[in-house]
Each structure stands twice: as C-alpha cells, then as structure tokens.
Image (cartoon, helix red, strand yellow):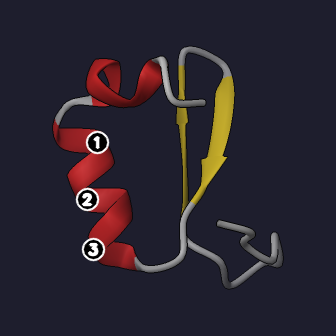
C-alpha cells in the first residue's frame, strides 16, 4: 500500500525508524506489537 507522507498522516517511530500509516487504527495495531510487522517492512 502506498501512503502519502504529509504532516497529517499517522506515523510512529520505533527503534529510530519512522513508519507511516493509512489510518490511526493501523498505527495503534502496529504499536501493540511492532515486532510482528518488522519482517514485512
């Protein structure tokens, strides 16, 4: 999925890596278990 990285786009920084999300719900889910998604990025 392509996400537009603009100021209003939800994002999180984990271990120095910024990840951008399509919506706040995806950001919340990611932050619950970032290691689960590490291999996908």
Q: Is label 1 in a helix, a strand or a loop?
A: helix
- Say which quarter of the image contains residue 21: bottom right
Q: Is label 3 in a helix, a strand or a loop?
A: helix
Identified at 60% across, 30% down, the residue is: 41
> CB under 8 Å between callouts 3 and 2?
yes
Numbered tag placed on residue 12 in the rendering: none
Q: Which residue is mark 2?
A: 28
Q: Is residue 23 left or right of residue 36?
A: right
How far apart are the alpha carbons under marks 3 and 1?
10 Å
How far apart are the alpha carbons under marks 2 and 1?
5 Å
Identified at 46% across, 21% down, the residue is: 38
Mark 2, Cα crowd under 10 Å, few <14 / some 14-19 / many 20+, is some
> CB under 8 Å between callouts 3 and 1?
no
Q: Is residue 36 above or below residue 8?
A: above
> CB under 8 Å between callouts 2 and 1?
yes
Numbered tag placed on residue 31 in the rendering: 1
Identified at 83% across, 78% down, the residue is: 6
* First-in-chain label (3 vs 1): 3
Q: Which residue is mark 3?
A: 25
């Amino acid at each position: 999925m392509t996400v537009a990285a603009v100021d209003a786009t939800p994002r999180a920084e984990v271990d120095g890596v910024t990840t951008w999300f399509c919506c706040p719900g995806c950001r919340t889910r990611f932050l619950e278990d970032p290691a689960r998604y590490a291999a996908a990025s």
